[in-house]
Image (tube, grey):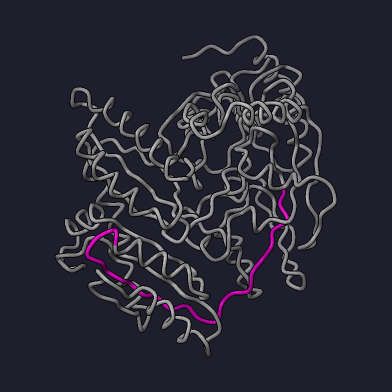
Amino acid sequence: MATISDSCAGLIDRLQTEFGPATVLTDPADRWAYGYDNSRRQTLPAAVVMAEDHASVVRTVLACDEHRVALTVRGRGTGTAGAAVPSEDGIVLSTERMSRILAIDHGNRVAVVQAGVINGDLQRAAAAHGFFWPPDPTSADYCSIGGNLGCNAAGPRAVKYGTPRENTLGLRAVTGDGSSLRTGCYTTKGVVGYDLTRLLIGSEGTLAVITEATLKLTPLPERIMTLRAVYRDMEAAADAVSRIMAQPVVPRVLEFMDGAAIGLVRRTAPDSLPTDAGALLLIEVDGAAGTLQLAADAVADAAAGPGMLSLQTASDDAAVAALWASRKALSPALRQIAPKKINEDVVVPVSRMAQLTTALESMAEEFSVTIVSFGHAGNGNIHVNILGDPAVSGETRRMSDCMETMFRKVLALGGTLSGEHGIGFDKREAVALEIEPATLEIMRRIKTNFDPRGILNPGKLFPDLSAPT
């Protein structure tokens, strides 16, 4: 069991005096429960502070800053890049008790929420007034708004409605020296001062602890139509994506699966797809009931072309479920194929998706690993799963080398290393491949201004930002 430093022990005594033992958790069983995220990394923190409001966050950050102890903010731990994994001998600040929806202002299409509100809870509250908040990660039923903002996590609807950056009007936050900030405004237009709202979104808790958000709501569509297009190969599917995104009707969802993904689905649902399917697109179109068929027809016309094997349109809820069955069968199949999975969420220009997927096939052969790709085709956001077995000699090294080769190919195609999972700990060493030294230095200076002693989530996001000074 790791020992707690004198500095951290003094900090814990101070926090327990201020907040009480029900708020500051020190039992190892509690600490282990807050020491991991979906990256499967885990570190034992020195203590966990269960913040309940902005004021308690300020007091916690001030105490950590004065004692020079690392502080990692944590929502529900659904992130996959290690951003919520704490520093050893550091403090976890959990926002799960900050779960109040402060306002649903339907007249202005605005919601004000604490950072710990669950995405799905907000969606249900907004739906009662005829609205929704567009970001919809797969984990929406149990991830927090603060976590969504921290990683700019979006989900399938981003192709039409944008990411959290496009759907957040303002924030309340606490910097590393305990200063309180209000960013943005309550209106959809405003250009006073620097755009700190967009800066904090996606910063993974390294600049400030987000405590409250003012969110832009969108009216619920009257109706949604679902289509599934199956293609001979990924090149034909990628060409279809380019055609779909070039016409005026923007789909609500445009997802894809490559041939390897389809092969896995056939293991659990052998009759779900044509035997010669090499790629598929799942498409949703939404809007007014009276015009939706025209919109769906426009998207279907764009989807048609060389290499398309079939196109189906769902007529009722059961048909919708049937069209999505192949996609939902994929995750269980992935869990069965190999004991280790590297899951990256790279992005390339839509017109170059086929180039990347073709390159991935070559990489799978070169490094003797299995690669399965699927994701958000309308954004070019590809979830690349590199699968292998660490028990096989050299497999872990080959998987790592394959990942680096993939990163370099993505950048050569004009892409970026992460679309929504973030950088966290897992990809921080690769950031220098994408961001040039002069830009990284500017970012380092920004970090220092927000967090002078470097206590906020050290060792994440960038390779050169490590421990509190």
Q: Is residue 240 above or below residue 406?
A: below
Kindly identify the residue that appears in the image at 51 percent across and 71 percent down: 250
Which image quadrant is residue 61 in? top right
Q: Which residues are magenta?
A: 212-235
* Left or right, residue 458 beside residue 453: left
Residue 267 shows in this picture = yes
The chief SS type of the magenta part is: strand
Q: Is residue 214 magenta?
A: yes
Q: Which is nearer the eye, 323 or 281? A: 281
Which image quadrant is residue 100 in? bottom right
Which image quadrant is residue 342 in? top left
Q: Position of residue 18 (x, y in %)?
A: 76, 28
Q: Position of residue 87 (x, y in %)?
A: 55, 23
Q: Is residue 395 above or below residue 88?
A: below
Q: Position of residue 317 (x, y in %)?
A: 37, 78
Residue 34 shows in this picture = no
Q: Quadrant of the C terminus?
A: top right
* Left or right, residue 327 beside residue 97: left
> From this viewpoint, which residue is outermost toward the top?
6
Q: Which is nearer the eye, 23 or 389? A: 389
Q: Is residue 134 above or below residue 142?
A: below
Q: Position of residue 301 (x, y in %)?
A: 38, 79
